[in-house]
């Protein structure tokens, strides 16, 4: 009997506990007084941070325990609504929010309680407290749900000859969702910008094995900062309406005040730019009187504000007070734009809940890993998302998931992929002439790429008209590993010489960036091994202008290289290179130019076409490079590690050793160099700078030949590479050194700081650039360059000056294209 009673009590109490912990679902729609849906309404269990948000159509869903619940519905521009409900079963409850009425009654904010009814005084009080609230959050943890969606509103039927509707899976009108994804993350924060995010679940429409690009930190925006969105939609960023210098950029107007659900007085302030083309916002901000905190924002940026790539951006942010600390409850970014005939819109929304603003983190809790995506995050089934998704899908989004997920399963089958490959692999003449021809075997993750002939035919004075052709085989694996093999042949029709080599690479560790490569064969190599003019540009200079800037030699080589990260941000690369090296002579002098300035292949004897720069010799060289980026942040995904651009310098140390007598090696030297590189140091509205400082020395130079000298990133062509490391005018070869050197490079992008103030030019959104470079060595003492230029998207034009000590030796224009 006692045993029976015990079992009965266990069963009874167990059933009672299960019922008490049961979660029921509350759904409904939020509308305004006219029946229009209110999107992205924040819905919280009152006095907690457990809640959700309505979707773009006003629909919401909330999982709640059985019993009496007090719910608070808030939205920017509407009266908050507090409802007490008794929940004993799944329930539908539609909510109507009333537009908030802001009245222009006197607001007591002045000294001695004298009423002042001006927006300026409210903003001044808020600015006075700006730094306090900027630094008040010591730490917090919370759960974040993010969703991103982009869709095309209209599109051209064809784009570069490709069927847009088929490629992007649009409807017959060229409309449809092109990206839809959701994530659920755990976010931890501590002062001094320490962030740790773990993505628990991730869903991407049409990609069962993909991981969402959404992350909670992407939606972080803090208007207590003087400048926000730096280097996001333009170089300089945008001035906050409550920045220290707000009154130099904004006009404010008090639209009225209102009492919120907690009895606080909220002032609605209209924000307008003083000058329409300044990098500023338009819209409204809501401020809590007395404490002078931000309550919420509804702000816009347009093309006139200087944003790139999109036409408008609308930011809505609602804040919540927890233990007298302000944190976001929801944030929403809406975009619209049109480019190349594609009209698009989209949004990203983040819902924050379950805050703890007094967490206890251990000393080593935070690291440079800002996001970790769990390997199982993309394995959640539809039942999980139905239960866990706090913001309901719209009908369009739901249909998009169903359609693309079903198609995705079909597309992963061998039969389907083979049928697609048959279409993609159809050969046409344009592909082999202008663009690479790729032969796919998608199911096995294989591809073969054939170089285009357009880039394979070139001219230089060593080989004359020449052909260099390569085919690349790539085999990928599910975990991100891959290997590639690339055989290459090169033939000069003037010197009648054939070269061939093969390169093999194995990327074996995506998390540690582990790679090993092997190459052997013969090749024609540039005497300056650093990045400089390519074969196509050199051909143009030679054929059209009669100037052969590039100089070459031949080598028969065996090369082995390995690199791997052995600790976060520490990467080691080691190379062993064995080569027989031979100087070459010119064999061709053809040009369309009436006056040819062709020089010998020996840059130190330009008029002696029989001069050989160095004797035939053998070299065995070992080198190692250790790189470290200070405090570099990174994201860890199951398919690899991805680094974020650091705001701190990158340090690099290289040691190179020429080993004598190893398989008849003729070289004997030791070279050590160090480099500090910093990209994109931001100066708020004044733009950003990049800087490089390098120095090195041959510790031993008993026996070395010209290919082993220290070379520099030089340029003699009209077209130049705009990387900060490169000189504009320096000769490729004459000032390489066998002793010591010091070099420095600097450039600054003002991001339209000056041109935006010129009415006739501001619409062009041209970025102003200044910079310079310096080099000193025994071969070239106190060489310097100074330049200024203008950039628009990927096109840049500079005008520069070169000086040898204090003597100006060259000046002129330089052009660049690319995204440096």
Image (cartoon, rainbow, N blue to C red):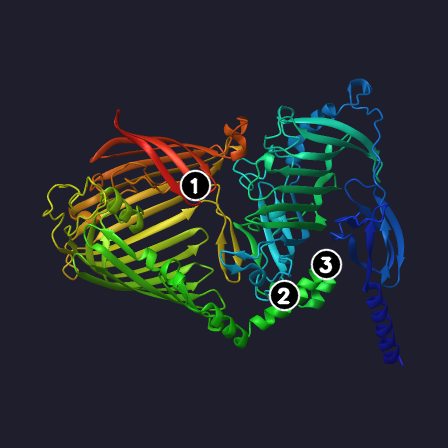
Of badges 2 and 1, the one in the foreground is 1
Lower sequence index among marks 2 and 3: 3
Question: Seen in the image, is 205 located left or right of residue 665?
Answer: right
Residue 589: where, in percent of width, then height? 17, 48
**How many C-alpha atoms fall within 10 Å of the one at disc 1: few (<14), some, or many (≥20)?**
some
Position of residue 625 relative to residue 250, above or below, is below
Q: Which residue is mark 1?
A: 795
Label 1, label 3: how far apart the Cα atoms are: 42 Å
Residue 797: where, in percent of width, then height? 40, 36
Q: Which residue is mark 3?
A: 393
Residue 151: where, in percent of width, then height? 64, 54
Residue 118: where, in percent of width, then height? 76, 23
**Looking at this view, is 423 or 817 the one in front?**
423
**Looking at this view, is 119 or 451 the one in front?**
451
Dividing the picture into quarters, in which one does residue 554 lie?
Answer: bottom left
**How many C-alpha atoms fall within 10 Å of the one at disc 3: few (<14), some, or many (≥20)?**
many
Secondary element at image label 3 = loop
Lower sequence index among marks 2 and 1: 2
- Label 2 close to label 3 by CB (< 8 Å): no
Secondary element at image label 2 = helix
Label 2, label 3: how far apart the Cα atoms are: 15 Å
Position of residue 555 relative to residue 528, above or below, is below
Lower sequence index among marks 1 and 3: 3
Which quarter of the figure is the C terminus placed in?
A: top left
Of badges 1 and 3, the one in the foreground is 1
Secondary element at image label 1 = strand
- Res. 404 mark: 2
């Amino acid at each position: 009997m006692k045993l029976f009673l015990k079992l009965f009590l266990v069963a009874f109490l167990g059933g009672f506990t299960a019922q008490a912990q049961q979660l029921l679902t509350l759904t409904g729609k939020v509308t305004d007084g006219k029946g229009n849906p209110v999107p992205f309404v924040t819905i919280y269990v009152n006095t907690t941070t457990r809640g959700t948000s309505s979707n773009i159509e006003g629909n919401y869903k909330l999982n709640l325990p059985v019993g009496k619940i007090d719910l608070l519905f808030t939205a920017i521009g509407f009266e908050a609504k507090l409802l007490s409900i008794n929940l004993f079963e799944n329930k539908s409850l539609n909510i109507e929010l009333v537009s908030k009425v802001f009245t222009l009654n006197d607001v007591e904010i002045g000294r001695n309680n004298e009423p002042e009814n001006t927006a300026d005084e409210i903003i001044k009080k808020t600015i006075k407290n700006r730094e306090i609230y900027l630094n008040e959050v010591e730490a917090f943890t919370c759960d974040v749900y993010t969703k991103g969606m982009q869709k095309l509103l209209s599109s051209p039927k064809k784009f570069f000859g490709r069927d847009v509707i088929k490629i992007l899976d649009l409807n017959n009108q060229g409309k449809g969702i092109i990206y839809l994804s959701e994530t659920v993350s755990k976010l931890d924060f501590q002062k001094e910008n320490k962030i740790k995010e773990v993505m628990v679940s991730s869903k991407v429409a049409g990609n069962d094995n993909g991981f969402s690009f959404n992350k909670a930190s992407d939606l972080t925006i803090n208007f207590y900062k003087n400048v926000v969105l730096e280097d996001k939609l333009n170089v300089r960023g945008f001035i906050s309406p409550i920045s220290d210098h707000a009154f130099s950029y904004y006009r404010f107007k008090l639209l009225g005040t209102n009492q919120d659900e907690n009895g606080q007085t909220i002032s609605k302030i209209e924000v307008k730019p003083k000058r329409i083309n300044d990098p500023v916002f338009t819209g409204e901000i809501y401020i809590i009187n007395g404490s002078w905190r931000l309550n919420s924002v509804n702000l816009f940026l347009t093309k006139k504000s200087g944003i790139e790539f999109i036409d408008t951006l609308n930011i809505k942010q609602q804040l919540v007070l927890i233990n007298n600390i302000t944190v976001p409850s929801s944030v929403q970014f809406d975009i619209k734009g049109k480019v190349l005939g594609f009209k698009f819109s989209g949004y990203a929304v983040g819902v924050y809940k379950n805050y703890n603003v007094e967490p206890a983190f251990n000393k080593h809790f935070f690291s440079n890993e800002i996001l970790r995506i769990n390997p199982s995050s993309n394995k959640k089934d539809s039942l999980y998302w139905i239960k866990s998704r706090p913001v309901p899908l719209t009908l369009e989004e739901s249909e998009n998931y169903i359609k693309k997920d079903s198609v995705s399963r079909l597309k992963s089958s061998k039969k389907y992929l083979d049928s697609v490959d048959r279409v993609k692999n159809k050969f046409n003449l344009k592909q082999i002439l202008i663009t690479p021809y790729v032969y796919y075997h998608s199911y096995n993750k294989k591809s073969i790429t054939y170089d285009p002939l357009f880039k394979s035919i070139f001219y230089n004075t060593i080989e004359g008209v020449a052909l260099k052709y390569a085919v690349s085989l790539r085999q990928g694996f599910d975990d991100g590993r891959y290997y590639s093999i690339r055989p290459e042949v090169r033939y000069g029709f003037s010197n009648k010489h054939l070269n061939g080599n093969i390169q093999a690479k194995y990327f074996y560790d995506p998390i540690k960036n582990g790679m090993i490569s092997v190459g052997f064969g013969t090749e024609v190599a540039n005497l300056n091994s650093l990045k400089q003019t390519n074969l196509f540009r050199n051909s143009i200079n030679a054929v059209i202008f009669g100037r052969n800037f590039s100089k070459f030699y031949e080598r028969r080589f065996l090369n082995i290289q390995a690199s791997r990260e052995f600790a976060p941000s520490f990467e080691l690369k080691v190379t062993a290179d064995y080569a027989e090296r031979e100087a070459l002579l010119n064999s061709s002098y053809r040009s369309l130019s009436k006056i040819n300035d062709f020089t010998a292949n020996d840059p130190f004897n330009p008029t002696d076409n029989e001069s050989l720069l160095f004797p035939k010799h053998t070299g065995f060289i070992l080198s190692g490079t250790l790189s470290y980026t200070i405090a570099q942040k990174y994201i860890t995904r199951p398919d690899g590690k991805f680094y974020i651009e650091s705001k701190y310098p990158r340090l690099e140390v290289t040691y190179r050793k020429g080993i004598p007598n190893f398989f008849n090696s003729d070289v004997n030297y030791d070279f050590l160099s160090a480099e500090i590189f910093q990209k994109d140091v931001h100066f708020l509205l004044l733009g950003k700078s990049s800087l490089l400082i390098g120095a090195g020395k041959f510790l031993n130079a008993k026996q070395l030949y010209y290919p082993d000298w220290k070379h520099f990133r030089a340029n003699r062509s009209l077209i130049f590479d705009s990387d900060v490391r490169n000189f504009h005018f320096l000769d490729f070869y004459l000032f390489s050194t066998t002793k010591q050197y010091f070099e420095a490079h600097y450039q600054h992008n003002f991001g339209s700081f000056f041109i935006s103030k010129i009415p006739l030019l501001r619409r062009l959104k041209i970025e102003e650039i200044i910079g310079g470079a310096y080099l000193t060595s025994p071969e070239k003492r106190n060489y310097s360059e100074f330049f200024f230029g203008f950039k628009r998207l990927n096109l840049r034009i500079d005008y520069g000056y070169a000086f040898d000590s204090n003597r100006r030796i060259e000046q002129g224009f330089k052009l660049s294209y690319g995204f440096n």
